[in-house]
Image (spheres, grey):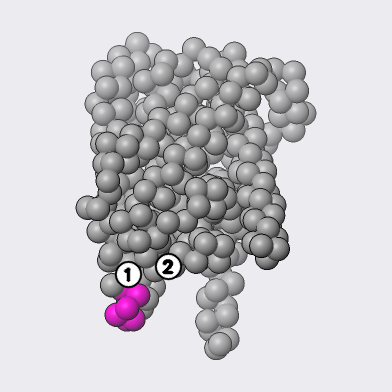
Amino acid sequence: MSVGKIVANILKIVLPFVLGIGILWWMYRGTDWRDFLHCVFHEMHWGWMALSLLFGIVPQLFRAWRWRMALKPLGEVPRSRTCVDAIFLSYASSLVVPRIGEVARCGTLKRYDGTSFSKSLGTVVSERMVDSALMLLLTAVAVLSQLPVLLQFLKTTGMSFDQVLHRFTGTGYLVTILCLVAVIGFGYYLFKNLSLFSKSKEIARNVWAGILSLRGINNLPLYLFYSLGIWVGYYLHFYIAFFCFDFTSGIDPVAAFLIFCVGTFAVLVPTPNGAGPWHFAVKTMLVLYGIAEPQAILFALVVHTIQTMEVVLLGAYAWADLTLLRRKTEKS
């Protein structure tokens, strides 16, 4: 491997961390960490957080079961347990190397259940297409439903869109531009690697078969139920966290859904679990809905930290469970 390629591979890992850490530093540079600890241990309602974390698991289960459905028409029948572990592990691995989860989950099925890597990768592409279409549709609904509320809010507070934009500092604009550049750069990277990857005709055929696997699904209503359930689960994972704090508990569910949609698009920036861009997006939207900026910043930090810890724990569980499966297979 050439020196240039080694440097490029290192940069793929380092730059997302640098971007995420840079945004986090800028947002929390003046934070009194005693306020953070007081918020976690004295102000947060842990019962609501526990319920929120439960809905962090449900979408991943739905994603695993939906994935297994898409593989069946291709003649691949991995165990449901392995699919669930692969999904858990994919989210955790993406904390180390952003967007590596798709490769990790396909590799997990290949290793433990002998599932074709290229076919499973094709089904991942198809489900991303379904997820993207659903997310765009839901976001459009959220924006249209909240537009009158936003206009009324601006009228009531005497603010205009120009004034809202003026609340963006120069650094805020810079962060937004950097996030957009990162998304475009990551898209180019994927396109370039996919074109190289597709040089192998056999692999390309398998990937294409995976993409077309939706045509052979026996129970399409169930597939669509899982697809919608994934986003409902993620939304509840986010919205229920609002009740953990008195200062966000009054935000209505439709407004929360718009904030959720904006945060979801921020996660497209390739940083570990959206760290940095997600905080910035959620904080900005909360401030727009009247939450004081220090409280909005704390909300984003506390919720994201705890939800990321959940991803780590689920990944550790998946790794332990897969190790147990391998040992059982070796003994039999």
- Quick check: can you spot residue 197? yes
- Quick check: can you spot residue 22? no
Q: For this rendering, which residue is in front, 125 or 253?
A: 125
Residue at 62%, 24% in the rendered image: 49
Determine which residue is flagged by label 1: 206
Q: For this rendering, which residue is in front, 162 or 65?
A: 65
Q: Position of residue 109 (x, y in %)?
A: 51, 61
Give the number of the disc on residue 116.
Answer: 2
Query: Residue flagged by tag 1: what amino acid is it?
Result: Asn
Mark 2 and mark 1: span between their CA atoms?
8 Å
Query: Which residues, given as a range, are shown in magenta?
Result: 198-204
- Assign a secondary structure to mark 2: loop
Would residue 293 be found to the left or right of residue 140 on screen?
Answer: right
Q: In the picture shown, does residue 188 fall above or below 47?
A: below
Disc with the residue nearer the chain's start (2 vs 1): 2
Q: Position of residue 2 (x, y in %)?
A: 55, 88
> Quick check: marks 2 and 1 in contact, CB under 8 Å?
yes
